[in-house]
Each structure stands twice: as structure tokens, then as C-alpha cells.
Image (spheres, rainbow, N blue to C red):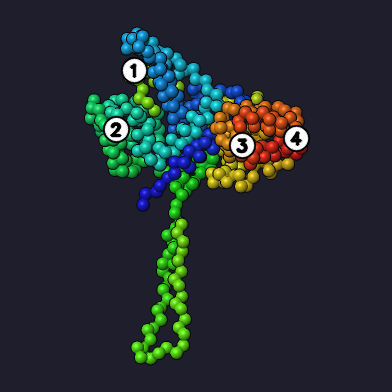
Amino acid sequence: MKTQYSHAKREQYGRLLAALLCDQYFGARPTATLDGPAVLRFTPIRQVNLFVVQQLLNKWTAEMAQLRSPYFDFEDADVRLALTQFMNVLSRRIKISRPAFEPLLADAITDTLTGCLDPTETFARKLLGEPASYAPEKLREGLRYLDTNKSLFEEFLNGLPAGQEQDRDYLVSRFRLHQESCPEQVQPVLAMVEQFNVLLPLTEQELHETEEPAAAEAAPAAAAPKPAPAPAPAPEAPVTAPVAPATPAVTVPTAAPAAPEPLPQPAEPAVAAAAPAPAPETPVAPVQPTASAPVSVPLYEKLKAEQPAAPSLSETLRQDRAGTLADKAPKVESLREAISINQRFGFINELFNGENMEYHAAIQHLDTLPSAELAKRYITEDLSTKYQWVRKDEHINKLIKLIDRKFNG
């Protein structure tokens, strides 16, 4: 039976790893930004970096399409050329901060895992997109952003009739057959999982759908011999002794709107042409990010050095049960540093309506307050009123406990 993988678990891992990577990179530099080359070498997994760049290009294209209006001729050759040049210049001026970058990185991690677990889904989302019909020449433009299983996609597109548009459903169905006929071209799931495991512990089993109770658990009940029925009494011989009731059998309980006419394909952005910086041959000692720390040290080398101390995905998801950093440490120096990744997601989703930037602004302000009394008053009066915290006692108490650790440790 084909293994079923959970999309929700992929997304959860993507968010956790993206938060960890951003914590390591931005650290004490919350206002730092990334340019194109930095994006392309942000992780040692090239496919993740390329998917981030692809998302940026898609957003630029969508924004450029919004410039169209009925008052100007956007099909004029000079206008088309100017727009193409503008796109190329813009692609060399990437400047992206953490609040904008982190969700892109999380999606790219999720999509990279999907590309290994289900190449057909990647073909449908990353190469086909939204239009209803496609020409092979147009589809090949998306290959520049594919690294995982790239030969599988290239061989399929090369086999399509040139210049002939095909229906979306037909292409997806045909690609699935192509994938099944070329299993040797599909990267093993374990190989990709091992690459992610270097950054944040992950096993293939942690990506599986939650399984039903194993059939083996019910097997003993099914195989248990049924009690033999009591022998029938002779017709004329009355039974003089009471017959014990038969032992009952044991049972086991079972458990996006259509875009305007596309602009001409711009020359490949300079950022896409850049090659990711190769990893150094010798490990780099972990560097705790500070305001004066050099940015030249590859991020993933720091994470490799810190690997033994990183929790597994299942352990991270159970972090609330084990307690946060504030529960274990006698003293909290900084709320931002003390709040665990899993706890941070809980605060953002439950207290700040999913707004990452508002959460960071509130925690940063709390860290600047001089006393526990002022910090608690800011929580119970300002934040509680602003976000209408009703029935949020559990999360509010955890935040107040962190404040007590900081000021009263």
C-alpha cells in the first residue's frame, strides 16, 4: 500500500524550521535585511532557496500586472521593453526583512518536502500554475527554479509535442504515469529527509499520516479460540446439574483570480543566475549572532554545529507538555530569547491574531520595561484591551510567568 504523507505535518515542520533559521540569522539584528545572493545561500538545500526566489518573482509579476489600465497601451513594444528592463533592475535590488521573508521560507521548505514526497503535485503547482492550457515552451521556463528531480521534469517536457497546447488535467494525468514509469529518476525520500535533519531533526515517519491502530493489535482477539459449546443433553435424560454459562467471546475496541494577459517573459533575473555559495570543507564553529557578528559565516554551518542540542520534530510539537525555557531556567534575561519556538507560535496565534510583526513589537516593548509591575500592567491593560483577550488565561499566565522569571528570577 502506498505511504500516505501528511501535508499538515509538512507545513508544521516548515514553520518550525523557518523560525529556527530566522532566529539564527536575524538574532540580535531584528532590522537586518537579505539581498538576492544572501537568499540564494540562506540554506544548504538549494531547492529551498530557489523556491523562495520563485515566490519573489511571482509576486513581482502579479504586482506588475496590476499596473495595467485601460488608459495606456501596455502592448506597445517600447512599453514592454521598459517593463522588462524595470523587472531586471528590480531583481538586482532585493531587500527583504524577516517579517516578509519568514513566511516565504516556510512555504519553500514545505514545497521542497512535497517535491520529494509527491513530484506530481509539484508539477501541477510549480510548473502549471493557474492557466487552463499550456505550451511546452512556456512550461520549460519554470525549470530554472527546480533542482530536486529536475531530470524527471525535463524528460517529460521534452516528450511533449512542440508548439501544441495541452489541457491541464491531461498533463497532470500524463505526468503521473511518467513518474510511475521512471522511479529511478525520483530522489529517495530518505535522502531529502537527511538533508533537513541536519538543520532540524526529522524522520520520514514523522511526515506520515496518523495511522489507524495496527491490525496486529486486533489479531490475538481474532485468533483466540472460541469456547466450545456445551454438549446438547440427551432427549430423554433430564439434566440434573446446572450448566455453567458459556464464556463470552473477548472483543477488542476499534479505534487566486485569473491574472491579466501575462507580460513578456523577462530576461532571467540576475538573482536566479547566481550559484549558492559552496559549503566550507571544514565545519565552522557555531557563532551566536550579535550586533557585531559577521554575516559572512554560512547560516547552515552554525546549525550543523548546534545539531546535537536540537529537538526532534515530535519533541518540539510536545514542547508545551515538557515546559518552556522559562520553566526550566531560574532566570530570564530576555523574553524574546526565553520564549520557545512552539510557545511563540502559540502566542502569535492565540494572543496576536496570527500577526507576527505585532507579536515581535509587543515582546520587544516588554523587554524594554524596567519593572515587572509595568510589564504586567502593559499586558493586562494595554494588550488585553487592544486584542480583546477573552478566555486566553492559559497563554496570558504563561507570558506573565516569563515576566516573573525575568524580574524576580
For mark 4, give the secondary structure.
helix
Do we see residue 283 in this rendering? Answer: no
Q: Amino acid at mark 2?
A: Arg
In space, the residues marked 3 and 4 are separated at their CA atoms by 26 Å
Look at mark 1 in the image and give the residue it sits on.
Answer: 264
* Residue 226 image point, x, y percent: 41, 73
Q: Amino acid at mark 1?
A: Pro
What residue is drawn where x is 68% and y is 30%?
Answer: 381
Say if 272 sits above or below 221 in the image.
above
Relative to 141, 321 lies left or right? right
Of discs 3 and 2, which sits in the foreground? Answer: 3
Estimate how packed mark 4 is, as few (under 14), some (14 to 19) or many (20 or more) residues with alpha carbons within 10 Å: some
Relative to 400, 251 lies left or right? left
For mark 1, give the secondary structure.
loop
Of discs 2 and 1, which sits in the foreground? Answer: 2
Q: Foreground: 305 or 79?
A: 79
What residue is drawn where x is 48% and y is 38%?
Answer: 11
Number of numbered markers: 4
In space, the residues marked 3 and 1 are separated at their CA atoms by 51 Å
Of discs 3 and 4, which sits in the foreground? Answer: 3
Look at mark 4 in the image and give the residue it sits on.
Answer: 407
In space, the residues marked 3 and 2 are separated at their CA atoms by 47 Å
Look at mark 2 in the image and give the residue it sits on.
Answer: 168
Q: Amino acid at mark 3?
A: Val
